[in-house]
Each structure stands twice: as C-alpha cells, then as structure tokens.
Amino acid sequence: MKVEPRQAARFLAELASARHPARVLLLHGDDPGLIRERAEAAVAGMLGPDRHDPFRLAVLERSGHERLEEEATAGSLIGGRRAVWVRDGNDALLGAVTRSLASGSDTLIVIEAPELPSRAKLRSALEANPAAAVLACYHEEGRALEASIATALAEAGVEIDRDALAFLADRLGSDRAAMRQEIAKLVLYAGPQRERLGLAALEALSGDAADLSLDDAAHAAMEGDLALADRAVERALAEGASPVALLRVLLAHLHRLRAARAAMAQDGLSAADAVKGLRPPVFFRRAPGVTKAVSLWPAAALDAAAARSSAVERDCKRSAMPDTALVREHFARLARESMRLSGRPSAGRR
C-alpha cells in the first residue's frame, strides 16, 4: 500500500499495533534525515523500551543485507515482536522481502532507501502488497516546513513567535537533520522554564554566524557575491555542515526563485511583488537580495542551475573527486554566472 505523506504521523502511530496489516515499511525519497527520523519512530513505536535490545532488533547495513530473511523469520528469545531495520535498501532486497512476507512471521521490517529510483521494482512490488507500506519522504517547504518546526518545538514545550518561526524556516532550509539539531539547541536555550522564543532571541543566538551560513552561501551565489559565497561555503564546511547539506539548501532556494519567476510570468508581477507573494514569506532582511536574484536569473537559467545542482549532489555521492571541492566550485560558478547576468566582470575562474 502507498501511504500519503500527510498521513505519515498517524500511520506510524498505528503501525505499532500487532493487528496492523503492514509488516514491511519502505521509506524512500530525497530527505535522508526525514527517512531516518521516521524509521526510528516506527521501530521505537513497536519496541518501546526494548528498541535497543539486540534480541528484539536487528540493524542491517548494506554489508548485512544477505541476512534479512534469516533475521526476519527468526523468533524472539525473550518474547514479543521483533524488528529488522535495513539501511541503504535497493532492489536486491526484493526476493528476501517477498519470502519473509510469505513466511507468516510478524517481524516488522523497516527499510531505509534514500537512493531508490522511482521505477524501482522493490517500490512497485510493495506498493501493490497489502502487507507492506511505502512512504515517500521528501524535503518539506513553505507552510509544511514551518508546521514541522513549530510541532517539534511544541513537543518540547517551547512556543515561538510567528516572525521568529519564519526567520528560522528561512535559515534552516529543508534539511531535516539540520532542523532537528537547531531545535535541540533552541530547547536548551529556552531552559527549564521553556521561555517563548522571539525574533530577537533567534537573531542573538545566530551571533556572528548569522552572516555566514548554509543559507547565506545559497543567497550570495545567486546574487553574485562571489567573495561572500566562498566565505560562507568555507565557514559552513568548517562548522561541520556536509557538502550535500549545502546543496540541499541551495536547491530549496532555487525552488523559491523559480516560484517567484513563475508568478512573474503567469500574473505579470514585478520581481518585488513576486517575492512578496512567496509563502512562507521571505524574511524581510533577505527580501532585497532575493528580489535581486529573481530579477537577474531568467526562468530557463534557474531550471538549468537546479539541474546542475542535482547533478553535483549525485557526483558528491558517486564521484572519486572530493565532494567539498565539487561544492566549492559549483557555488563559485553560480556566483560568476550571477555576475555575468548582472553585467559585472566575474574576476575569472578560480
């Protein structure tokens, strides 16, 4: 069966029941952080306090895929249902999964498959099987992203002002792992009294890094500030951000620019009015730069930039070339292209 993303929370809560028909959960999509989060929720929901007990949980990395059927059909030595958590899933698992389902075992199989293509046999087979569930995990944007941030804070007992929420969503982009890390910091800041978070507090927490972040790298590149883009990339990498995280934030920003360009074409809006119409709203301090980027970049060029960014992400995962070098060069190329579009000299190649 196919589970709609909007039903994910309810589905994961119901999955823990022994009477639930699904005994396999396949998680796929372009957000590895969200895939991992939902896999953890599925396992924890079923096993509860025993979720780290090796007698009830088997975690299989790619090198252990051949043990899937054995683990899925094994009984628990201490009673209770077992779970098998498989990472880096692919089509090679289809035979073992099919046989495990046919065995009648009540073991729950949770498969993380962030690299699974849309036409994968594993995905189509499980979508057609009533004893399996397939849940797509894509990057959240707009109101969905704001809602997730607000919900995560609310679960920790922390409230946040609306303008502060917009600021946070704009800075975090759509990277789920980064969002969770930032929320953990904010909960610590709020303290045991769970003080309400306002815009001033978030700006203060950003400190000197407010001018140099993953988000800043994306904005600077698309606005043609080569020096700032370079410094922001270096700072983000030095602070532990992954090259793929930088690319994900860039892709989210490109999506916003493309949406504004589409509004200009469809509704005859100016760049400034198109940016004002974006949802969630662009943080007011970002608006002039975003308007500049929308004015500079034609729709076709934005489409090409997004395609190149996706290709660089694939290369980071597969190429022998260092991923940090690939990302530095990509951001620099975008900044130089922005400078060319604005009519300024690009200072040559690095």
Image (cartoon, rainbow, N blue to C red):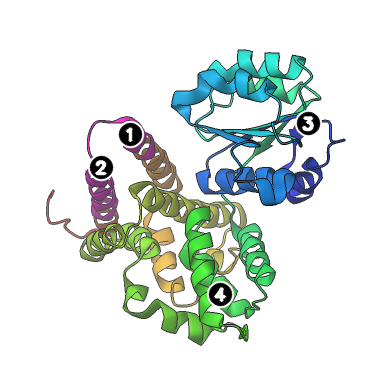
Residue where numbered disc 1 is placed: 315
Of the pair 162 and 34, the residue shown nearer to us = 34
- Horizontal and vertical percent for residue 349? 13, 48
Q: Which residue is mark 4?
A: 187
Labels in figure, total: 4
Residue positioned 44% across, 66% down in the render: 291
Helix, strand or loop under label 4: helix
Residue 165, horizontal then vertical, whole percent: 59, 73
Q: CA distance from mark 2 to mark 3?
A: 41 Å
Q: Are marks 3 and 1 in contact (CB under 8 Å)?
A: no
Q: Main secondary structure of the magenta part?
A: helix
Q: CA distance from mark 2 to mark 1?
A: 8 Å
Question: Which of pointers 4 and 3 lies earlier in the amino acid sequence?
Answer: 3
Tell me if 290 is positioned left or right of 212 in this view: right
Residue located beneath label 3 in the image: 22
Three-letter residue code for mark 2: Leu
**Whether label 2 touches label 1, CB < 8 Å:** yes
Task: Give the crowd class for mark 1: few <14, some 14-19, many >=20 residues within 10 Å.
Answer: some
| 3D distance between C-alphas at marks 3 and 1 | 35 Å
Chain-order first, disc 2 or disc 1: 1
Question: Where are the magenta residues, as a range?
Answer: 313-337
